[in-house]
């Protein structure tokens, strides 16, 4: 077995790695404006931010099984001319090693149309995976299962971040149900 | 080069290329693989195989057939070290996959030779359950790369949670991290190649678990395979865990190479030519 010495890879010394691991790295995929245009091309967007009352927060947390979210939810009412063609929501979730900002496009009746990660900020770097492929968001609505299922043993710290997005989407669907459905 | 990222295949899938429409089309290809091969959706090809293929042949999409044929190829080469039928049974037992109402319990002896592909249909000789999660993610990456190339993109990258493939003239630097410390331990680069990594998962006590790889007390904590395509890299990175002695022969099937990180921090570089020249 050949060990090291090969030219196609380099073993990183611990000291050098400690230096490169320290800064937080962020990947920006889309700005909010670019995501809006990608998800609803040519539409107009009216800001419709939601400042939750404590009672609303508790209802949403109870309905979605997910607590812990920002005080103000950034929401846009999306229109083509005068008719509503959907909702555009920006949300963020915190993982063990990262913070993820993402956008969700909803149809006017509250089904997930598309999910895009806007920014992924990680403290260490590395892969993110969940062996079981639980998330399939498109078409989901409030009340349909958007969850990882029962707790899975051996979830890696990294896996948690994709689960946090799943939880976040479930919380947004509950938010739609309570505050946007009849707006 | 623009990059987009969406949650798919149970991870974050990142697509980079110089054409935003092509990126959209690449995501559509990944979504199609997800839809066909997720064992969670009851009407996916994989779920229909798990529900009915022990009774009658189940007609599947061409992509599903290709994934299963490739899985069969790697099962044969590795003498079952890579086995989507045993993986399915294990995933079901561990509660990682649901058992649909009309889906039978897999028999105890279920393994890859029970799987048959006839034309566009798949059969199971006896009640069993397949899980193609160990190969289909790589296949999805390959389909996305194909879409980008057909759209005329000259270079690009598709990364599905560490199963990644680059194409074009540029070298793509990649870093392999330690699964426990998350420290960057190996730097390498890819050129028109794919890399897939599988590693131990940290449990609540901060120990690495290898149950998901079906490996007991392995000598390595992480294995990364570089291969011409992501589907083969993905399958190989699983097969090597359970066939460490045959690793060279397996890699040589498709001209692949591997970097394995041992428990004591050593890096083993595995490739067929290394053994020949030694």
Image: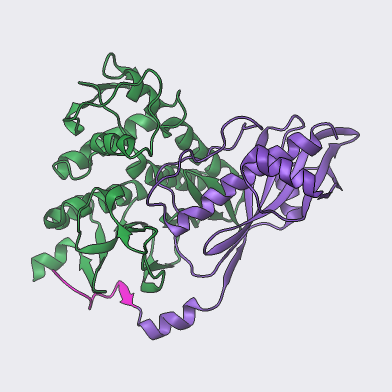
Q: Which residues are magenta?
A: A1-11
Instruction: Name the foreground residue: A126 vs B58.
Output: A126
Q: Residue furthest top?
A: B56
Image coordinates of residue B4 in percent, x first then y, are 59, 53
Q: Is residue A95 above or below residue A7?
A: above
Quarter-of-image position of residue B71: top left
The answer to whether residue A181 is above or below residue B145 is above
- Which quarter of the figure is the N terminus of chain A placed in? bottom left
Q: Is residue A54 left or right of residue B273?
A: right
Residue A108: x %, y % from top left: 77, 32
Residue B258 appears anywhere in the view:
yes
Chain coloured purple in the rendered structure? A
- Residue A102 at x, y = what percent? 65, 52
- Where residue A35 sits in the image (x, y, percent)? 71, 50
Q: Say which residue appears at 28% left-offset and 50% top-offset.
A: B211
Q: Tell me, by letter, which chain the rendering colours green.
A: B
Q: Which residue corresponds to the image point at 75% horizontal and 38% vertical from the top-left?
A: A176
Magenta segment, principal secondary structure? Answer: loop
Determine if the magenta segment contains residue A9: yes
Q: Residue furthest right?
A: A82
Instruction: Name the quarter where the C terminus of chain A is drawn.
Output: top right
Report the residue at 66% width, 53% height from top: A68
């Amino acid at each position: 077995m050949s060990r090291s010495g090969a030219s196609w890879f380099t073993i990183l010394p611990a000291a050098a790695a400690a230096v490169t691991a320290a800064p937080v790295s962020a990947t920006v995929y889309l700005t909010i404006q670019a995501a809006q245009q990608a998800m609803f091309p040519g539409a107009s967007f009216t800001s419709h931010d939601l400042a939750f009352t404590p009672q609303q927060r508790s209802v949403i947390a109870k309905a979605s099984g997910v607590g812990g979210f920002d005080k103000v939810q950034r929401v846009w009412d999306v229109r083509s001319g005068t008719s509503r063609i959907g909702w555009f929501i920006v949300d963020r979730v915190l993982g063990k090693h990262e913070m993820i900002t993402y956008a969700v496009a909803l149809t006017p009746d509250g089904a997930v149309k598309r999910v895009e990660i806007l920014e992924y900020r990680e403290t260490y770097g590395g892969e993110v995976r969940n062996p079981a492929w639980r998330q399939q968001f498109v078409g989901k609505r409030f009340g349909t299962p958007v969850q990882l299922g029962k707790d899975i043993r051996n979830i890696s710290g990294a896996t948690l971040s994709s689960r946090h997005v799943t939880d976040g989407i479930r919380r947004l669907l509950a938010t739609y149900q309570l505050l946007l459905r009849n707006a | 080069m623009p990059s987009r990222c969406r949650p798919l295949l149970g991870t974050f899938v990142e697509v980079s290329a110089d054409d935003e429409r092509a990126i959209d089309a690449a995501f559509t290809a990944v979504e199609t693989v997800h839809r066909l091969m997720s064992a969670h959706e009851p009407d996916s090809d994989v779920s229909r195989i798990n529900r009915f293929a022990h009774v009658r042949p189940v007609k599947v999409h061409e992509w599903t057939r290709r994934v299963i044929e490739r899985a069969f190829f790697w099962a044969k080469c590795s003498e079952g070290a890579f086995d989507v039928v045993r993986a399915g049974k294990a995933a079901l037992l561990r509660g990682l996959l649901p058992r649909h109402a009309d889906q039978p319990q897999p028999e105890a002896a279920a393994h890859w030779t029970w799987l048959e592909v006839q034309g566009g249909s798949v059969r199971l000789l006896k009640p069993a359950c397949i899980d193609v999660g160990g190969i289909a993610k790589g296949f999805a990456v390959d389909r996305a790369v194909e879409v980008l190339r057909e759209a005329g993109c000259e270079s690009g990258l598709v990364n599905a949670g560490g199963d990644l493939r680059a194409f074009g003239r540029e070298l793509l630097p990649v870093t392999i991290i330690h699964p426990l410390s998350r420290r960057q331990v190996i730097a390498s680069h890819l050129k028109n190649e794919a890399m897939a990594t599988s590693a131990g998962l940290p449990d609540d006590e901060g120990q690495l678990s290898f149950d998901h790889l079906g490996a007991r007390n392995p000598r390595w904590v992480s294995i990364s395979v570089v291969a011409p395509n992501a589907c083969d890299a993905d399958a190989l990175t699983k097969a090597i865990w359970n066939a460490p002695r045959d690793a060279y022969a397996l890699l040589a099937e498709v001209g692949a190479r591997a970097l394995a990180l041992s428990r004591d921090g050593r890096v083993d570089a595995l490739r067929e030519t290394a053994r020949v020249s030694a």
